[in-house]
Amino acid sequence: MSTALSYESRTLPDRAEAEYASRRMQLLRRRPYQAAVPPALATAEFPFSPALLAEVDDATQELVRFDAERAYFVAPFSAILLRTESASSSQIEQLTAGPRAIAEAVIGERTEGNARLIVSNVHAMEAALALAGDISNASIIAMHTALLGEASPQTTGRFREEQVWIGGQLPQTAGFVPPHHERVPAAMDDLIAFARRTDLPPLAQAAIAHAQFETIHPFPDGNGRTGRALLHSMLRHSGVLRQLAVPVSAGLLTEIERYFDALTQFRTGDHEPIVQVFAEASLTGVANAHRLARDIEDAQASWQDRLSGVRADSVARKLAQISIEFPVLNTATAARLSGSSRPAVASGLDVLVERGILARGGSAKRNRTWINVDVLDALTAFAERAGRRRRG
């Protein structure tokens, strides 16, 4: 079966504001444009080459192994991986922020800028995993609402109701024109039916579903991040990942042009490149996540030495553990998470500063914060290893 798109001729509706454009633009706007018509996938066959199936199997085994091996570390590490995956997914869309800024946004010390948008992407990922048992149009809309409900509520709660295009001022000059909005509901119904199939390798199926989602482009904005959240929902739904969210987007970042090229190839009828890209990205993401886990474990071991003589049930030790998941803390967050009084928290934070585990810092709101430099350094190193690279 070919995933090649067909196209149909459409025209833009008349709008009063178009009267204020140049005559050339007015004439261009009246001309028909070609909108994509995606093929149905629900009952289609997808042949894969033996070499690709072997690589998909290798990547799937690594995902399963990583999920199992890090089970003991799930409590803080799950949240860390969600944030790293959300940061990488956002970076693909040119939304960047450093680990400290993201950590500040998590506890409300930053309320604007890219860091806040990345935290919204974390919420979309959380929704994707929570709704993994029910992959449906409603759950996808819920993921999108978690992503943009705060920043752009007028675009959430439903699929788009107008034509969109990628690149260019008008669809007549765009690089790609997704399906007309009248086709979106049926196309999404078909995608959901495809996502529920049980006769395809889960990782390959998730990659193809992602590519089809990006082709349909069912929302006015946030399609890339929502589509990558959908991929994680499908990996959780299939049982490949049961506890963690592996930073696949960090793997995509290493060769971002291949990812975009593979989406284009999918639309011209070749489904293998997008599967190949996600298999390789999974392996790269797992390797990077293993390194991140080791860096944090090494930091934890050094803290144990520095906390020699401090009671095992002390507030200081509780806060040291909490600072893995929350490498920037303020008093309110530390008290809430530790279940301790503010005086006890203040004392515990002082101990951690004295032992060199936390450092005092400011914040965007100029409130007092404490930072775990070791964890932030580990997250920065992770981001640098994932760093967006271009083929040279």
Image (cartoon, grey):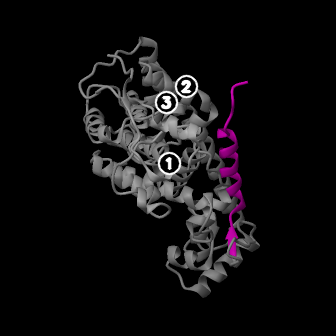
Name the residue rendered at 61%, 66% in the picture. 112
What percent of the width, then of the height, locates residue 33? 44, 31
The range drawn in magenta is 369-392
Name the residue rendered at 29%, 47% in the picture. 137
Q: CA distance from mark 1 to mark 2?
A: 34 Å
Position of 283 relative to 48 (above/below): below
Q: In the displayed structure, does residue 143 sit left or right of residue 339? A: left
Kind of residue sitting beneath label 3: Phe
Taking the view exactly as shown, the residue that stands out farthest to the bottom is 343
What percent of the width, then of the height, locates residue 43? 23, 24
Q: CA distance from mark 1 to mark 3?
A: 42 Å
Provide the residue designation for mark 1. 18
Position of 73 relative to 196 (above/below): below
Position of 68 relative to 51 (above/below): below
What SS does tag 2 mark?
helix
Provide the residue designation for mark 3. 278
Kind of residue sitting beneath label 2: Asp
Q: Quadrant of residue 223?
A: top left
